[in-house]
Amino acid sequence: MSNRVDVGAPHFRRTIIRVLHRIGRRGASLAFVGLLSLAIAASLAYVPADQRVAPGYAMLASIAPLGVWALVWCATGALCLVQMFMRSDRVAFAVATALLMLYGLVYLFSTFTGANPRGWVGGAVWLAFGGWISLIATWPEAVVVSRFPGGEAEPGAEPEAVIVADGAGVIQSWNPQAAILFGWTIDEAVGRSLTMLMPPRFRAQHSAGLARVRSSGRSDLAGRIIPLVGLHRDGTEFAIALTVNAWHSDDGVTYTGVIRPIGGGSVQPE
Protein backbone atom coordinates (compact mmCIF):
# COMPACT_ATOMS: atom_id res chain seq x y z
CA MET A 1 0.00 0.00 0.00
CA SER A 2 2.74 2.48 1.00
CA ASN A 3 4.79 1.69 -2.12
CA ARG A 4 1.86 2.57 -4.34
CA VAL A 5 1.49 5.91 -2.62
CA ASP A 6 5.21 6.67 -2.98
CA VAL A 7 5.14 5.85 -6.68
CA GLY A 8 1.85 7.57 -7.40
CA ALA A 9 2.62 10.86 -5.65
CA PRO A 10 5.52 11.92 -7.95
CA HIS A 11 3.48 10.88 -10.98
CA PHE A 12 0.56 12.99 -9.77
CA ARG A 13 2.84 15.99 -9.23
CA ARG A 14 4.33 15.61 -12.70
CA THR A 15 0.83 15.44 -14.17
CA ILE A 16 -0.19 18.61 -12.35
CA ILE A 17 2.95 20.40 -13.54
CA ARG A 18 2.31 19.33 -17.15
CA VAL A 19 -1.28 20.58 -16.94
CA LEU A 20 -0.16 23.91 -15.48
CA HIS A 21 2.45 24.29 -18.21
CA ARG A 22 -0.20 23.46 -20.79
CA ILE A 23 -2.81 25.97 -19.62
CA GLY A 24 -0.45 28.71 -18.39
CA ARG A 25 -1.21 31.43 -15.88
CA ARG A 26 -4.36 32.53 -17.68
CA GLY A 27 -5.73 29.00 -17.74
CA ALA A 28 -4.95 28.44 -14.06
CA SER A 29 -6.82 31.65 -13.22
CA LEU A 30 -9.78 30.52 -15.30
CA ALA A 31 -9.74 27.18 -13.48
CA PHE A 32 -9.97 28.99 -10.14
CA VAL A 33 -12.79 31.26 -11.35
CA GLY A 34 -14.61 28.31 -12.91
CA LEU A 35 -14.54 26.21 -9.75
CA LEU A 36 -15.54 29.21 -7.63
CA SER A 37 -18.43 29.94 -9.98
CA LEU A 38 -19.69 26.37 -9.69
CA ALA A 39 -19.48 26.60 -5.89
CA ILE A 40 -21.48 29.85 -5.94
CA ALA A 41 -24.02 28.25 -8.25
CA ALA A 42 -24.47 25.35 -5.82
CA SER A 43 -24.85 27.72 -2.87
CA LEU A 44 -27.61 29.61 -4.71
CA ALA A 45 -29.38 26.49 -5.92
CA TYR A 46 -29.56 24.88 -2.47
CA VAL A 47 -30.23 27.79 -0.13
CA PRO A 48 -32.01 26.57 3.04
CA ALA A 49 -35.52 27.99 3.35
CA ASP A 50 -34.75 29.82 6.59
CA GLN A 51 -31.85 31.69 4.95
CA ARG A 52 -33.73 32.94 1.89
CA VAL A 53 -34.97 35.92 3.93
CA ALA A 54 -31.39 37.07 4.62
CA PRO A 55 -30.71 40.50 3.05
CA GLY A 56 -28.21 39.20 0.49
CA TYR A 57 -30.42 36.41 -0.83
CA ALA A 58 -33.59 38.50 -0.64
CA MET A 59 -31.92 41.28 -2.63
CA LEU A 60 -30.83 38.86 -5.38
CA ALA A 61 -34.26 37.22 -5.47
CA SER A 62 -35.90 40.61 -5.98
CA ILE A 63 -34.03 40.92 -9.28
CA ALA A 64 -34.29 37.33 -10.53
CA PRO A 65 -35.09 33.94 -8.94
CA LEU A 66 -32.14 32.39 -7.16
CA GLY A 67 -32.37 29.46 -9.57
CA VAL A 68 -31.68 31.84 -12.47
CA TRP A 69 -28.65 33.28 -10.69
CA ALA A 70 -27.45 29.73 -10.04
CA LEU A 71 -27.83 28.87 -13.72
CA VAL A 72 -25.85 31.96 -14.78
CA TRP A 73 -23.01 31.15 -12.37
CA CYS A 74 -23.02 27.51 -13.47
CA ALA A 75 -22.80 28.47 -17.16
CA THR A 76 -19.97 30.91 -16.39
CA GLY A 77 -18.07 28.25 -14.46
CA ALA A 78 -18.46 25.71 -17.24
CA LEU A 79 -17.30 28.23 -19.85
CA CYS A 80 -14.18 29.05 -17.79
CA LEU A 81 -13.31 25.39 -17.31
CA VAL A 82 -13.67 24.71 -21.04
CA GLN A 83 -11.72 27.72 -22.27
CA MET A 84 -8.91 27.23 -19.75
CA PHE A 85 -7.56 24.64 -22.22
CA MET A 86 -8.06 26.86 -25.26
CA ARG A 87 -5.77 29.52 -26.67
CA SER A 88 -8.75 31.76 -27.38
CA ASP A 89 -10.13 32.41 -23.89
CA ARG A 90 -11.35 35.98 -24.24
CA VAL A 91 -15.03 35.05 -24.04
CA ALA A 92 -14.59 33.32 -20.68
CA PHE A 93 -12.67 36.26 -19.23
CA ALA A 94 -15.22 38.75 -20.55
CA VAL A 95 -18.21 36.80 -19.19
CA ALA A 96 -16.60 36.20 -15.79
CA THR A 97 -15.58 39.85 -15.46
CA ALA A 98 -19.04 41.07 -16.45
CA LEU A 99 -20.80 38.78 -13.97
CA LEU A 100 -18.49 39.73 -11.10
CA MET A 101 -18.90 43.43 -11.84
CA LEU A 102 -22.69 43.00 -12.07
CA TYR A 103 -22.74 41.23 -8.73
CA GLY A 104 -20.69 44.03 -7.17
CA LEU A 105 -22.94 46.75 -8.56
CA VAL A 106 -26.06 44.94 -7.37
CA TYR A 107 -24.65 44.71 -3.85
CA LEU A 108 -23.68 48.40 -3.86
CA PHE A 109 -27.10 49.42 -5.14
CA SER A 110 -28.77 47.41 -2.40
CA THR A 111 -26.85 49.47 0.15
CA PHE A 112 -28.19 52.75 -1.20
CA THR A 113 -31.76 51.43 -1.32
CA GLY A 114 -31.53 50.09 2.23
CA ALA A 115 -32.34 46.52 1.19
CA ASN A 116 -28.93 45.32 2.35
CA PRO A 117 -27.28 47.88 4.65
CA ARG A 118 -23.93 46.10 4.62
CA GLY A 119 -24.05 45.32 0.93
CA TRP A 120 -21.22 47.76 0.26
CA VAL A 121 -18.80 45.25 1.81
CA GLY A 122 -19.78 42.51 -0.60
CA GLY A 123 -19.94 45.02 -3.44
CA ALA A 124 -16.37 46.14 -2.83
CA VAL A 125 -15.16 42.53 -2.74
CA TRP A 126 -16.95 41.54 -5.96
CA LEU A 127 -15.80 44.64 -7.82
CA ALA A 128 -12.21 44.11 -6.71
CA PHE A 129 -12.43 40.47 -7.81
CA GLY A 130 -13.81 41.53 -11.19
CA GLY A 131 -11.01 44.06 -11.60
CA TRP A 132 -8.46 41.37 -10.82
CA ILE A 133 -9.92 39.06 -13.47
CA SER A 134 -9.95 41.86 -16.05
CA LEU A 135 -6.29 42.52 -15.25
CA ILE A 136 -5.39 38.83 -15.71
CA ALA A 137 -7.12 38.93 -19.10
CA THR A 138 -4.35 41.28 -20.28
CA TRP A 139 -1.56 38.88 -19.32
CA PRO A 140 0.37 37.16 -22.10
CA GLU A 141 0.94 33.46 -21.74
CA ALA A 142 4.11 32.56 -19.87
CA VAL A 143 6.55 30.64 -22.03
CA VAL A 144 7.89 27.71 -20.06
CA VAL A 145 10.51 25.51 -21.68
CA SER A 146 12.30 22.87 -19.64
CA ARG A 147 13.08 20.08 -22.11
CA PHE A 148 13.96 19.87 -25.77
CA PRO A 149 14.44 16.86 -28.01
CA GLY A 150 17.71 15.22 -27.12
CA GLY A 151 17.47 15.59 -23.34
CA GLU A 152 17.73 18.15 -20.59
CA ALA A 153 19.58 21.38 -21.19
CA GLU A 154 23.05 21.14 -19.69
CA PRO A 155 23.93 23.36 -16.71
CA GLY A 156 25.56 26.56 -17.90
CA ALA A 157 24.11 26.23 -21.41
CA GLU A 158 23.44 29.42 -23.36
CA PRO A 159 19.93 30.90 -22.95
CA GLU A 160 17.48 30.09 -25.71
CA ALA A 161 16.63 32.46 -28.51
CA VAL A 162 13.30 34.21 -27.91
CA ILE A 163 11.37 35.80 -30.76
CA VAL A 164 8.04 37.65 -30.58
CA ALA A 165 5.99 38.09 -33.76
CA ASP A 166 2.55 39.44 -34.61
CA GLY A 167 -0.29 37.56 -36.27
CA ALA A 168 1.11 38.26 -39.74
CA GLY A 169 4.46 36.72 -38.80
CA VAL A 170 6.34 40.03 -38.56
CA ILE A 171 9.07 40.05 -35.92
CA GLN A 172 8.34 42.45 -33.05
CA SER A 173 11.24 41.66 -30.71
CA TRP A 174 14.42 39.62 -30.91
CA ASN A 175 16.74 38.82 -28.03
CA PRO A 176 20.57 38.72 -28.25
CA GLN A 177 20.60 34.91 -28.34
CA ALA A 178 18.41 35.00 -31.46
CA ALA A 179 20.86 37.42 -33.06
CA ILE A 180 23.74 35.02 -32.32
CA LEU A 181 21.79 31.98 -33.55
CA PHE A 182 20.56 33.43 -36.85
CA GLY A 183 23.22 36.07 -37.56
CA TRP A 184 20.88 39.08 -37.82
CA THR A 185 21.15 42.00 -35.41
CA ILE A 186 18.11 43.15 -33.46
CA ASP A 187 17.68 46.25 -35.64
CA GLU A 188 17.95 44.16 -38.80
CA ALA A 189 15.44 41.51 -37.68
CA VAL A 190 12.66 43.58 -36.09
CA GLY A 191 10.03 44.47 -38.66
CA ARG A 192 10.93 41.64 -41.04
CA SER A 193 9.05 38.42 -41.69
CA LEU A 194 9.76 35.20 -39.82
CA THR A 195 10.21 33.53 -43.20
CA MET A 196 13.78 34.87 -43.36
CA LEU A 197 14.64 32.38 -40.61
CA MET A 198 13.58 29.30 -42.58
CA PRO A 199 14.59 27.68 -45.86
CA PRO A 200 12.46 28.75 -48.86
CA ARG A 201 10.88 25.28 -49.17
CA PHE A 202 9.08 25.77 -45.82
CA ARG A 203 7.84 29.32 -46.26
CA ALA A 204 4.56 28.58 -48.06
CA GLN A 205 3.58 26.07 -45.37
CA HIS A 206 4.42 28.62 -42.67
CA SER A 207 2.28 31.33 -44.30
CA ALA A 208 -0.64 28.92 -44.70
CA GLY A 209 -0.41 28.00 -41.01
CA LEU A 210 -0.56 31.65 -39.93
CA ALA A 211 -3.60 32.18 -42.16
CA ARG A 212 -5.38 29.23 -40.51
CA VAL A 213 -4.72 30.65 -37.05
CA ARG A 214 -6.06 34.06 -38.07
CA SER A 215 -9.24 32.52 -39.45
CA SER A 216 -9.86 29.95 -36.70
CA GLY A 217 -8.51 31.84 -33.69
CA ARG A 218 -6.50 28.89 -32.40
CA SER A 219 -3.20 27.13 -33.02
CA ASP A 220 -2.72 23.37 -32.76
CA LEU A 221 1.05 23.84 -32.40
CA ALA A 222 0.94 26.18 -29.39
CA GLY A 223 2.73 24.72 -26.37
CA ARG A 224 4.29 21.84 -28.31
CA ILE A 225 7.99 21.25 -29.02
CA ILE A 226 8.44 21.27 -32.78
CA PRO A 227 11.57 20.06 -34.60
CA LEU A 228 12.31 22.42 -37.50
CA VAL A 229 15.11 23.66 -39.73
CA GLY A 230 16.52 27.15 -39.24
CA LEU A 231 18.33 29.32 -41.76
CA HIS A 232 21.38 31.36 -40.76
CA ARG A 233 22.13 34.67 -42.43
CA ASP A 234 25.01 33.07 -44.33
CA GLY A 235 22.66 30.46 -45.84
CA THR A 236 23.59 27.61 -43.52
CA GLU A 237 20.71 25.39 -42.45
CA PHE A 238 20.63 23.84 -38.97
CA ALA A 239 18.22 21.79 -36.86
CA ILE A 240 16.27 23.64 -34.17
CA ALA A 241 13.64 22.85 -31.54
CA LEU A 242 10.84 25.42 -31.34
CA THR A 243 8.28 25.95 -28.60
CA VAL A 244 5.66 28.52 -29.54
CA ASN A 245 2.90 30.11 -27.49
CA ALA A 246 0.14 32.37 -28.77
CA TRP A 247 -2.16 34.79 -27.04
CA HIS A 248 -4.88 37.16 -28.13
CA SER A 249 -5.11 40.88 -27.53
CA ASP A 250 -7.03 43.79 -29.01
CA ASP A 251 -4.33 43.97 -31.68
CA GLY A 252 -4.81 40.33 -32.70
CA VAL A 253 -2.69 37.22 -32.24
CA THR A 254 0.84 37.48 -30.88
CA TYR A 255 3.36 34.63 -30.93
CA THR A 256 6.34 33.99 -28.69
CA GLY A 257 8.83 31.41 -29.95
CA VAL A 258 11.62 29.88 -27.87
CA ILE A 259 14.30 28.30 -30.06
CA ARG A 260 17.31 26.13 -29.35
CA PRO A 261 19.66 24.50 -31.88
CA ILE A 262 19.79 20.73 -31.71
CA GLY A 263 22.07 18.12 -33.19
CA GLY A 264 25.11 20.37 -33.23
CA GLY A 265 25.49 20.41 -37.01
CA SER A 266 24.22 21.81 -40.24
CA VAL A 267 21.36 20.29 -42.24
CA GLN A 268 21.75 19.47 -45.90
CA PRO A 269 18.90 20.82 -48.07
CA GLU A 270 16.52 18.13 -49.33
Image (cartoon, rainbow, N blue to C red):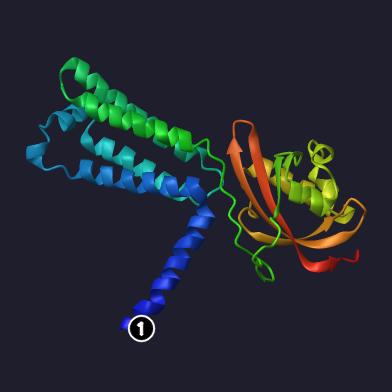
Residue 237 in the image, given as x and y percentages of width and height: 87, 60
Q: Considering only vertical position in the picture, is 134 above or below 231?
A: above
Q: Considering only vertical position in the picture, is 134 above or below 15?
A: above
Considering depth in this image, is 134 or 40 the residue closer to the camera?
134
Residue 216 in the image, given as x and y percentages of width and height: 63, 44
Residue found 44% across the figure and 62% down from its top: 16
- Residue 107 falls left or right of residue 78: left
Q: Label 1 is placed on what type of residue?
A: Asn
Number of on-image labels: 1
Q: Residue furthest top?
A: 112
Q: Residue furthest right?
A: 234
- Residue 208 falls left or right of residue 129: right
Q: Which residue is mark 1?
A: 3
Give the SS element for disc 1: helix
Residue 101 in the image, given as x and y percentages of width and height: 36, 28
The quarter in which the N terminus is drawn is bottom left
Q: Is residue 204 visible?
A: no
Considering depth in this image, is 162 or 70 the residue closer to the camera?
162
Residue 199 in the image, given as x and y percentages of width and height: 87, 55
Considering depth in this image, is 190 or 216 the residue closer to the camera?
190
How many residues crowd around disc 1 within 10 Å: few (fewer than 14), some, or many (20 or more)?
A: few
Residue found 85% across the figure and 50% down from its top: 183
